[in-house]
Image (tube, rainbow, N blue to C red):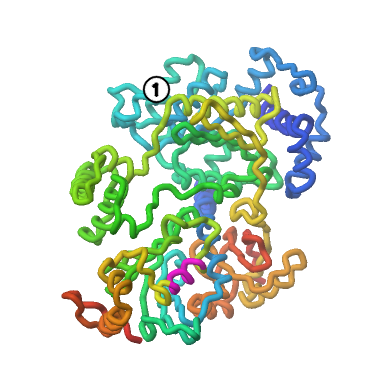
Amino acid sequence: MIKIWSMKAKEAAAEKKKPKTSAAQIRVQKDLAELEIPSTIEMTFPDPADILNFEVRISPDDAVLMPTHTGFYKGGQFHFTFNINNNYPHEPPKVRCTQKIYHPNIDLEGNICLNILREDWKPVLSLHSVLVGLQYLFLEPNADDPLNKAAAEDLRSNRRAFEQNVRLSMRGGLHKGISYDNVIA
Amino acid sequence: MTVPEAKRQRRENMLDVQDENNISLQSNLHHEFNNNADRVLEDSDMIDDSEELEAPGENGEILPLDSDQIKTALNACKILVIGAGGLGCEILKNLALTGFKDIHVIDMDTIDLSNLNRQFLFRSTDVGKSKALVASEFVMNRVPGIKITPFFGKIQDKDEDYYSQFQIVICGLDSIEARRWINAMLVNMVDDESPESLKPMIDGGTEGFKGQARVILPTITSCYECSLDMFNKPNSFPICTIANTPRLPEHCIEWASVLEWPRVFPDQKYDTDNPEHISWLYEKASKRAQQFNITGVTYFLTQGVVKNIIPAIASTNAVIAAACCNEAFKIATSVAPFLNNYMMYTGNDGIYTYTFEHQKKPDCPVCGTIAIKIDVNPEMLLEDFLDVLKEKPDTQLKKPSLRTATKSLYMQAPPALEKASRPNLLLKMGDLVGDGDEITVTDVALPVSMQLKVTMLKAQ
């Protein structure tokens, strides 16, 4: 009889130990389930059970997004990892570019200079804001907030040359001794 | 009076204070609180109050503090102190000297040399020992007849059973993450059918000359999560400034920790408690500072920036801890109305305090979430279960997405998750969830989410 009681106690303990959904998880679920993103942004989930870690692929096609605009990065596919911790949305998601690319606001290690990923993050922002912001970097690279200084300098001084460098780098070419990843879709 | 009786009485007293004396709180209760709160109030209306403590407020009378009623109330109150650091030492001292007899304290930290200037329960021989253990022993030696039970560990190590043994929880924490966790735990513990499951949480916090004290009645008043939008994210300089145009010593330190460390050690995160790691960051930051003619990078500043250390001022801790313990005493004994519900204090320019009622956030993911118990037929397909949810007249969901704590049952978006979870639609509920599981439902029609607590029906 005592054995049965201890079994029951164990059962009750197991019941209590059931993992709880954290506030961060609830918020991410809501962000994801209500996400409306253009076809130029694609997300993949290596483990569909885990919604806090995923990959994002951006194919900045200006024809879809800004018809009047000719973008530098058209035709490329850019890969990012998103890692969200349990302090979301107090803290922003951690986003990195997994390819070596030539971009004024992304360095060769994959760090990204996007204000809402750091100093301007607010809990009212969402994954949607980050995805849109990230895509915008490819439509309007910003020479004023450089992370890759050389690329920013090129963009500022000679847009033509910058464009050629982007094209070359996207094909996996070598520029100023740096070998870039091929990102052509 | 036996302990359970005293407990009950204390609880009733507490509710009486709300009921009779705290008019703004009461009007809130009637207007916007959930059914639980309304029901609790009705209960307390019916209580025969002939044995109650005298109601405070009307003529400002306070019972003699050594009266039997107050002693009984304090004896019956088991209180949990979270954190035994700057605020915690003050809180433990205050509670002990106020007459609380049964105190528990949790802290995961050990004593550091730099704590000794203000964490006055510790001596230099205690460096390296558990804060919770040393603080408990010190206060027990000093104050006769008091029992303090320490726990050297994380709040996350403890479960609902543990937290449900207390009547009041008082927090002197230094991290938002820990506060969010305990807040969510206490909100989730509230069971509509047992009023004693509601544990008032008193939260103190300090940062330099500033501080705040607040009283949270889980599910009734605004909770910690409701106020998350008010806080700025600390540190954070634009990454391009760090990379290209450093002007401050902090920029150089952030450069070393955010950009250089991951570049040199891509697979290793630095440990802020490892002196070798801090030294490495300090050297890199110093070199960079030299390059840019910046002065002021020191080992201590490096440690301060990477550990996000905020200067702690002993007197701010004393003010805030005193305010918190004042509230604990009033809640436990009902001698006076308690704080409703947020007091901020700044000592930067003279002294300034402002008290206001922080409003509940309707779309708060912790207390704004609707909890519903639901019977589930194990033979029902997930697809049909979704239809049941959509047809529920009180929620009227449009495109519900469902997850348990560990897996996606069905997600409406993004496409990759929808595709991955779609096969589940044709699975039986009994194969997807178990008895007692919680399902988180999000939907455009819900301010945040709905928590479904599953009771699995017996298979026919």
Where the N terminus of chain B falls, by quadrant? top right
Residue A183 percent coordinates (x, y):
31, 82
Q: What predominant SS class does the magenta segment belong to? A: helix
Q: Quadrant of residue B160?
A: top right
The region drawn magenta spans A129-136
User: B228 or A44: nearer the eye?
Assistant: B228
- For disc 1, the neighbor class at 10 Å (few under 14, some 14 to 19, many from 20) is many
Q: Is residue B334 magenta?
A: no
Point 45% across, 55% down: residue:
A91
Residue A165 percent coordinates (x, y):
27, 80
* Residue B167 seen by the camera: no
Residue B247, compared with residue A51, is above or below; it is above
> Looking at the image, which residue sits at the far front?
A157
Callout 1: helix, strand or loop? loop
Q: Quadrant of residue B134?
A: top left
Q: Amino acid at mark 1?
A: Leu
Point 34% across, 34% down: residue:
B110
Q: Is B391 positioned to the left or the right of A60 in the image? A: right
Residue A4, compared with residue B147, is above or below; it is below
Point 61% across, 66% down: residue:
B442
> What's the chain of the residue with tag 1?
B
Q: Is A163 positioned to the left or the right of B426 in the image? A: left
Query: Badge 1 is on which residue?
Result: B121
